[in-house]
Amino acid sequence: MRVLLRLLAALLGLAIAAAGLLTAVEVGWAWGRPRHRYLLFDWPYWVGRLRTLDWAGQQLHVVAWSVAAGGFVLVLIALFARRSPVVRLNDPNPDVTVVTTPRSLARLVGSAVRAEDGVAGTSVSATARRVRVRARSRLNTEDQLLDRLVETAASAVGNLPLPRKPKVSVVVDSPKDRS
Amino acid sequence: MSTQSRAALARSARGDRLFVGLVGLLALLAGAAALVVGQGWLGQFRAGRALLDPIAVSWLAGHADLARGLAIGIGVLLLIFGLWRFGRALRTERRPDLLLDTAEGAGLTVTGGALAAAVAEDSQTIDGVSRARVRPVGRSGRPALRITLWLTEGADIRAVWEELSTGVLSRARESLGVDELPTAVRLELDAAQAQRVR
């Protein structure tokens, strides 16, 4: 998204510069040499077109919708080209900022939970506010595992120097619970 | 937390976002205004007028020199503005040097590359760090550091965090003789090594 934003910013800058240059050159040319029709851009033709089109016309309708839609897309791109979210850790010094990625936090919790007995696999999603763990087990039921896994996940999160602890929630997925 | 260390986390896209957002907003408003006029919400008479309105054209013809001068001026301003935004969008992020002493004849500069390489080498000695990338960013003369550390699986993040602040960064501050060295640190946990099935 950020690459797209930079590319668009460069292209729009270039387009604005080209439009400005063309305007200045054509107006100057028409001013200095009134007998020549135009230099680069056939503006007399467009003046003729614009005289015949009215605001209610179908063509203008299409152009106006396209311009508005294009503008809307640009606004959306500008709004969504944010920094990827990070998880803040405590600052060890006033002039040091430490962050980690949500993915790293999820990996940390996932590997801690997987190390527990009876856990066959995990999937973890993490943000700075919330860590959700889904553990799969073949041999144990949710009742047998849940308390232990919650404690493991919470202590894995608790070991980190986080300014605010995310909420930890654990779900155990086991075929034993379905029978 | 200082704002400088926080700003060093990632390259700022504020200028580009503002520019693209404003251009988009202008296009959106212009298109919407044209549709409003075309629908006849500002009067059926207005909707039926030509795009290049004869009243406006006759006004321009009456003030021909002023209109031409303005058009050329605006064109030049747009050219400058557009080239400026183009250059800003394509410019790579600077790697500023650290000016330790600006005295005449006795200036002392630590190049950004040297600073980054020294801190990166020191960071890699921390237990649990598999790879370190360091880059000077920010103001010229007083750079901030952007450090990315990749940690091996099972690394103790709290220990790394402590070693970084009490060890690496304080050593860097001491050896450079500066009071503060704004730093943004990003810790990335490596994925577990894939186990080969035998």
Image: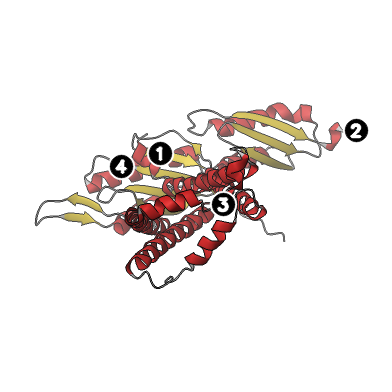
Residue bearing mark 4: B170
Distance CA(mark 4)–CA(mark 1) = 14 Å
Distance CA(mark 3)–CA(mark 1) = 60 Å
Kindly check if marks 3 and 2 are in contact, taking CB atoms under 8 A apart as contact: no
**Element at label 1:** strand
- Are dots 4 and 1 on a single chain? no
Q: Amino acid at mark 1?
A: Thr
Name the spot of residue A171 as percent of width and height, x first.
73, 32
Mark in front: 3 vs 2:
3
| Mark seen at residue A152 | none
| Mark seen at residue A179 | 2
Distance CA(mark 3)–CA(mark 2) = 76 Å
Any part of residue B164 in sight: no
Q: Residue at x 30, y 56 (%)?
A: B112
Looking at the image, residue A166 sits to the left or right of residue B112; the answer is right
Name the spot of residue B77 as percent of width and height, x first.
35, 55
Any part of residue B132 in sight: yes
Kindly check if marks 4 and 1 are in contact, taking CB atoms under 8 A apart as contact: no
* Quadrant of the snapshot with the C terminus of chain B: bottom right
Q: Chain of mark 1?
A: A
Looking at the image, residue A157 sits to the left or right of residue B149; the answer is right
Q: Amino acid at mark 3?
A: Ala
Task: Pick whichever, A68 or B106, lies toward us.
Answer: A68
- Are dots 2 and 1 on a single chain? yes
Q: In this view, which residue lies farthest toward the left?
A: B105
Name the spot of residue A114 as percent of width and height, x first.
68, 41
Give the mark nearer the N terminus: 3 vs 4: 3
Distance CA(mark 2)–CA(mark 1) = 50 Å
| Mark seen at residue A97 | 1
Residue bearing mark 3: B50
**Element at label 4:** helix
